[in-house]
Structures are given as C-alpha cells and as structure tokens.
Amino acid sequence: MNKKTKAAKISVFAALFLSVLKIIFGFVTGSGALIADALHNVADLFARFSGWLGLKIAEREPTEKFPYGYYKTENIAALFVSLLIVYASVELLINGYFRIFAPPAKLFLPLAGLAVSLVSLIVSFLVARYQKKTGKKINSQNIIANSRESLLDALSSFIVFIAILANMFNIYYVEGVIIVVISLFIFRFSVINIRNSVFSLMDASPSKDIEGKVKKVLSGLPEIQEFEGLKLRKSGPFIFGECTIRLKKSIDAEKAHKIADEIEERIKEVAREIESFALNIEPCKPKRQRIVLPVKSRVA
C-alpha cells in the first residue's frame, strides 16, 4: 500500500469512526451540537469517499460508449451528495435557530458528550498532523488540503466541547449558536463542492496557479519557439492538458516525440495534479530575411 492510499484510508476510517461515535452520543445525550458536528464529519466523509470512488471507477478501461473514460463519475457523485448535505445543513440551521430562543433542557450524561468531543478533537488533530507530514513527504497537495480539513474538524470538536460545557453550567443558548455556526460552515463547504463539481463537469480551467506552472515550463525550454492554445480541464480527481508548440528548428518525428515526452515529464514534475498533457507539435516558422540589393541608377 503506497503512502497516498494509506493516508486516504486513515482519513476515511477516522471520519467514519468519529461520525458514528458523535451520532450515537449526540442522540444519547440530546446534544444538537454533537449531532451537528457529526453531520460535519459525514459531509467530509462523503467528499473523501466520492474521491476514492472516482479513483476506483476511473481505473476502468474506456469503452466504445465512453471513449474518454469514467473520470467524471467522482464529480457527479460529489454533486448529488453535496446537494443532500445542503438540505441537511439547512434543516440543522433551523433547529439551531430555535434552540437559541427556546433552548432545551439540560443534557443527559453531559460528561459522555464532553469525552466524545475531546476524543474527536485529539483524533482529528493527530490525523491532520499525519496528513500534513505525509503530504509534504510525497508532495501531494490533495493530502495537504485534507490535513487542513482535519484541523477544522478538530476546531469544530473544540467548539462542541465548549457548548456542552456551557450547558452543564445552565448556559443553554450557547448550543443553539454553535449549531447555527456549524451548519453554516457545512452549508458553505457543500456549496463550494457543488461549484467545483459543476465547474469540472463543464471542463472549466481548474487553476491559474497550475496554468502558470505549465507556462513557466514551456517558456523555459530552449527547444520551443512559441506555444499557444494551452488548455487545462479537471476530470474527476485528475487534470488533463493540451497545448500546441512550435519548435525552433525542423527535426524528425522521432526526436519530436522524445521532446514531447520530456516536456510532459517536466510539466508533471512541477504540477503533480496533471495526469496527462497532450502536445501538438507544429513545424518551426521560417525566418523572414530581407535582402537589399544595390541598384545602379541610369543617368540620362
């Protein structure tokens, strides 16, 4: 098992474990904040699961009906899941609003709720540290981004801890406020996922940063005279690119193929998110030369 797969599995299992734990004790204790935090974990879990599912389905060979493969399966799955989570977050928001102005009674077994939120905080923090360390080690921006999400999970658990603690001291409205805050965070997270999924399905350019890296590589190669038509698109978890380049001198097909392979390799080194980069090689432009010939004038 490679480090990327291991990090993904640890992340998914941690999110699953914490989601189940929070849901169970959320209903046992009557803590809406704990249930809201569980929904936050579920949203995160579905996002990671859809990514994993997309990777697995993307491994299938292209068919006659789907000649470009199944990469966009992840985007479709993420879109539907995010729509469901948006609905759940709105319901949660309404529940939190009513809890502010009509707070429920004291929680049952609040110490159990505190323990669960504390466990969640510690687990999320440890997972975040592991993801960040692994992401930097293998240079995976995706895993580093997931580490930030795990850190936010830890922060969310800390906020829930405060809410349950406040309830123990008869400050009931705090839980309602925290439910509203968490539900808004989940709503924002889901809307961003919906936007990203729609953009990917519409083949929007994924990132100006990645585009800049590709342009830098192409501009820095001495063999290239000029390039044009640079296009990048995201399909599932992968980014695909294409570009037309014009070489500085005429070369045979075999050497042109080697140069194209070298360019693709360099691009993938600086932008590991790119799965494939297609190059269309045009012949070099002939240099225009101006020749001045002296003309002897005839004197009448």
Image: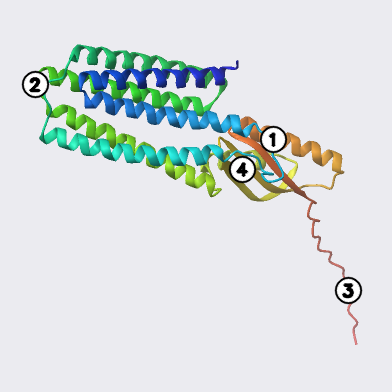
Viewer-proximal residue among 119 and 232: 119
Q: Nearer the viewer, mark 2 or mark 3?
A: 2
- Residue at label 3? 295
Counting residues from the start of the chain, the first of labels 1 and 4 encountered is: 1
Query: In whole angstroms, how far apart are the C-alphas of marks 2 and 3?
Result: 105 Å
Disc 1 on helix, strand or loop? loop
Counting residues from the start of the chain, the first of labels 2 and 4 encountered is: 2
Query: In whole angstroms, how far apart are the C-alphas of marks 4 and 3?
Result: 47 Å
Label 4: how many Cα within 10 Å (few below 14, some 14–19, many 20+) = some
Mark identifier at residue 215? 4
Measuring 30% from the left and 37% from the top, which residue is drawn there? 89
Left or right: residue 49 versus residue 174 is right
Q: For the residue marked with disc 1, what is the amino acid?
A: Glu
Counting residues from the start of the chain, the first of labels 2 and 3 encountered is: 2
Q: For the residue marked with disc 4, what is the amino acid?
A: Lys
Left or right: residue 211 versus residue 219 is left
Disc 4 on helix, strand or loop? helix
